Image (cartoon, grey):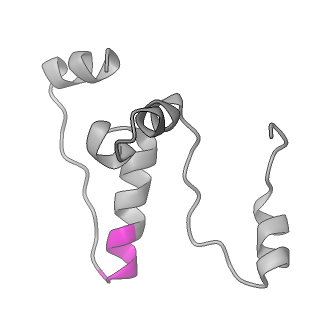
Amino acid sequence: CDLPIYKEEVENTLDSSVISIVPESEKVKEALAYEVPFVLEYPDSPPSIKIKKLAANLIGLRYIPREQGLLSKIVNYFK
């Protein structure tokens, strides 16, 4: 379904607050097609970083993404 999902609609439907929004990414779809967790396959992708931040937040920690060097950025671009 290509219809947008709005935060307020989700909150009203579930009668609860949304604590995080994970961005869409083709990388997630690719990982699912290969039946591989996207957080492992694309650890530095925006959805993976958002999931890691959420997980850390839920257990009272702060997640700090690792710095990526130029070579890592190039390799991840072609993954």
Q: Position of residue 57 (x, y in %)?
A: 38, 75
- The one nearer the camera, 38 or 67, is 38
- 59 inside magenta stretch: yes
Q: Residue at x 81, y 45 (%)?
A: 4
Q: Which residue is drawn at 46% across and 30% down?
A: 30
Residue 63 is drawn in which quadrant?
A: bottom left
**Which is nearer the eye, 15 or 32?**
32
* Residue 19, x across and y down, in percent: 58, 72
- Asked if residue 25 can be seen in this view, the reply is yes
Q: Nearer the viewer, residue 29 or 35?
A: 35
x and y percentages locating residue 64 in the rendered image: 25, 57
Q: Is residue 52 above or below residue 41?
A: below
Above or below, 37 relative to 77: below
The question of residue 23 being in magenta is answered with no
Residue, x 31% and y 21% (percent of image)? 79
The magenta span reads 55-60
What's the magenta bit mostly, secondary-structure-wise?
helix
Looking at the picture, tell me which residue is in the foreground, 19 or 30: 30
The N terminus, quarter of image: top right
